Amino acid sequence: MRLKKWLAGVLALAMVASMAACGSKGGADTTTKADAAETTKAEAGEDTTAAEGNDGEVYTIRFFDKNSGTRTFDDKIALELMKRTGVNVDVVNPTGDPAEKLSLMLAAGDYPDIVLMDRSSDIVNQYIEAGALIPISDYFDLMPHVQERYGEVLNKSVYSDGKNYYLNNWYGVDPDPVNAFCMRHDLMVDLLGEERAESDEPFTWEEFVQLLKDFKAKYPTIDGAETYPLVIGQPGTGEINGAFAGANGVKTMYVDDNGDLHFACDDPGFKDAIYQMNELYREGLLDPEWTSNASELFTSKLSNTNVFGFAGAWWGAWTPNAALDVVEGASVVEGVTPHYLAYKVLGPSVTAETTTYSGRSTLGWDAIGVTKNCTNIEAVCKFIDYCVSEEGQDLLLWGIQGEDWDIVDGVHTDIAGVAEAYEADPTNYVNENGICKWTWFVGNARHEDGTATRIYYNEMSETATYAYQNITTNAAYDTADFAGLQPAGQSMEALAYQTVIDDFDQYYPKMVNASSAEEVDTLYDEMIAKMNADGKADVEAYMNDLYQARMELWGMK
Amino acid sequence: MAKEPKTIAPKKKSVWNTIWHQRYLYILMIPALVWVILICYAPMTGLYMAFVNYKPTGEGYFKDLISAKFVGFDWFKYFLTHDFGKIMRNTLCTSGLTLLFSFPMPIILAILLNEVRNTHVKKFVQTASYLPYFISWVIAANIFMTFLSSTGLVNDLLKKMGVIEESILFFQKGPYFWWIIAFANTWKSMGYNAIIYLSTISGIDQQLYEAADVDGATRVQKIWYITLPSIKGTISILLILAIGGILTTGFEQQLLMGNNSILDYSDVLDTYAYRYGLGKGMYSYGTAVGMFKSVVSFILVMTANKITSKLNDSALF
């Protein structure tokens, strides 16, 4: 009996202890980070007044980054950033669908100090309308680097009340390539010869189809597996594959001759793009299961030796190229890499000058806003201003000066083989090393010495070289004109918008997978009729009004 | 003259007396009561959101909810006039097929397991059959997608058997999706649900079987005349619950295995409410769709309960 009582007592104590340990887990973690940052700050002898509260505690900025996945803020760049800015940073990961997380945080009012969200999504306007974001422009005098480096971008990003509620990520003029038809270099050399494979001359559609057919005829199987001439990723929302859109001059929205805005499906080039995809599907040249190719499966397929090429963003080639590098005998031509390299293909009604492969927004991909839950705006402003500065950007995107890079002969130079190590294993290297892991407040402009903003893109790899060589010229357009025009939040227009997009999303794969070109026409007409019935015209009118007002505000009308 | 014995009428206790008398039981009940109120009933105040145009303004949930513009049945009307038909068709077809397979399968499995005499085999089959229940849908979905891909096991097998020449693209044909979900649901829940029937079967009086043996009954006759009638009550109650949940046809499986090319077949009430409510921040609309589902489910449970109580004596309430 005594033993039982004794045991019960011990168990109860153990339970209490374990519960206390669980309860203090987060706190302990934060303290460790805080201690680390505090120690390094003290070593550096930095002014931490703004970051410290009245009780002398270092302020912790909670930062929601939709792109952070499951990454932890504990690498050497993260620690250095906290040391230099005098704050602690607690990154809030999306843990699932970022859009859902943002929506839930907004509904509950439980958002952290800073939120990074998709700039083109209506969630940004929802946050602004809900009063969740503070007008950051009220604090620009605390952030001299923001005004200096953002310049005109700030004027283009103002809300209807004339204030800025967020700072752009990946902002500024950007001629970088985006979409391309990325084909295996060794197979291109084998099928076309070295000269054509390495030329920057675009392919006509007929040439491209013939190339895919030749591949299929010569390589029905590779390593015992059936070959796929072209693989594409599963459909996105409200848009068609970017490479096919680019080949046919289709933008995210269509502006008619009168300057009025329409959904992209009204663009004359849209149907050409669908015809082309359908032709490939019917000829057995397109991966028949493309609609299920989620990003992991897509990358996994490309990492096998039985795929000739893919259509999509050229940087999708990084991981498969690294994977193919370690496959023995992957290349069919000795001395030529089995890398996917970018090529331009022209649709029937476009010229090399009118393609739209590279839709880039001068206003950036993401919006980074400070929320009203922030209790130390001075500390946050100091942090943001440092991140925006050239020194901050170099820390985030080049690493630590003297360790990863240095100025050699007046030029930013990789002194630790960072780019090479990255190319060998992109995902793991970024996670462990921290360079380019936290891409915040990034500008697209190059350094004054002409080097790239990111260390990995400075010494151009074969993959990047081809993308820049073949896709950069006459392929770019600014998507900022059309971003964020969709009806925000909860309204009948927003519901109608979503229904129309649903209609599109359902018909797009059906059209591509149709059994004939005639069926494509029938399905297209059905889709337009369904979209019209669901309020396409009203939604377009709503968006067009905003678009016209925007063009006027930006002096483009 | 013998006196009639005096009967003492039992003292009628007042309600308060009863409560006082059972006070410790009531005290023990308090935590559960608080839990039910806080977790099950308090959130129901949010149903009001379906009748207003709720927009978070950061002033607090209740303040935003009360000050939101009242729109009556506007969200319901939009749903009923736009996507209702398609979403209900998908929900009912998926659920109907799931019910068709996943309801009888655990009964069959339990009866078969009960007939297995080898304990090791019985335990092995039982464990193997309820293992899928503990596999997450992420893994289960990947298993199905791999098996059913154009180069997967199923297509390979069908080709080798000469049934097909070209691979079947299972995830690009809408109606196939309903069957795949029904099969996946059954595979995942069959073993686990069989436990309930097994426990009921183990409670059947063994003398009935012994008597049947004396009468020369075969195994099938014993199943038909003893086992099945004995578990009839459990079957009825589980059927009522299954019918009540007919509109809850799944969520993760649709999201994980569906794709845009079959969205008009894979989108069910739950995924639709999620896409609009959380995915697009249309909280009121999502709530309206969710509330619609709850009301229909409630009606279905009541109807099923009524029918079952008429047909036999077993009913939930």
Image (tube, rainbow, N blue to C red):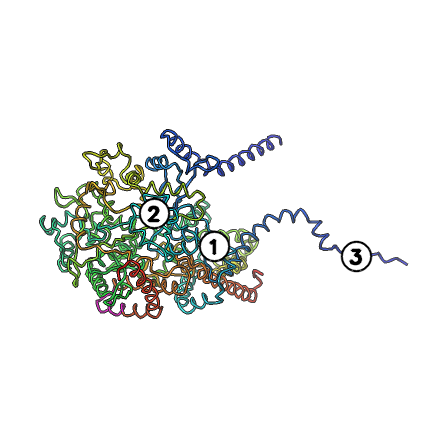
Q: Does the magenta-highlighted stretch encompass residue A263?
A: no
Depth order, front residue of B69/B276: B69
CA–CA distance in space, label 2 to label 1: 52 Å
Extreme right residue here? B1
**Mark 3 lies on residue:** B9
Magenta-colored span: A514-524
The image's mark for residue B111 is: 1
Q: Mark 3 lies on which chain?
A: B
Answer yes or no: is residue A240 visible. yes
Specify whether A163 is left or right of A394: right
Label 2, secondary structure: give it: loop
Label 3, secondary structure: give it: loop
Q: How crowded is mark 3: few (under 14 residues within 10 Å), some or many (20 or more)?
A: few
What amino acid does circle 3 point to?
A: Ala
Counting from the top left corner in percent of width and height, residue B296 is at 49, 64
Q: Do the residues labelled 3 and 2 touch (CB within 8 Å)?
A: no
Counting from the top left corner in percent of width and height, residue A251 is at 25, 59
Q: Do the residues labelled 2 and 1 touch (CB within 8 Å)?
A: no
**Mark 2 lies on residue:** A67
Q: Residues within 10 Å of mark 1 (few under 14, many from 20)?
A: some
Counting from the top left corner in percent of width and height, residue A74 is at 36, 37
Q: Residues within 10 Å of mark 2 (few under 14, many from 20)?
A: some
What amino acid does circle 2 point to?
A: Asn
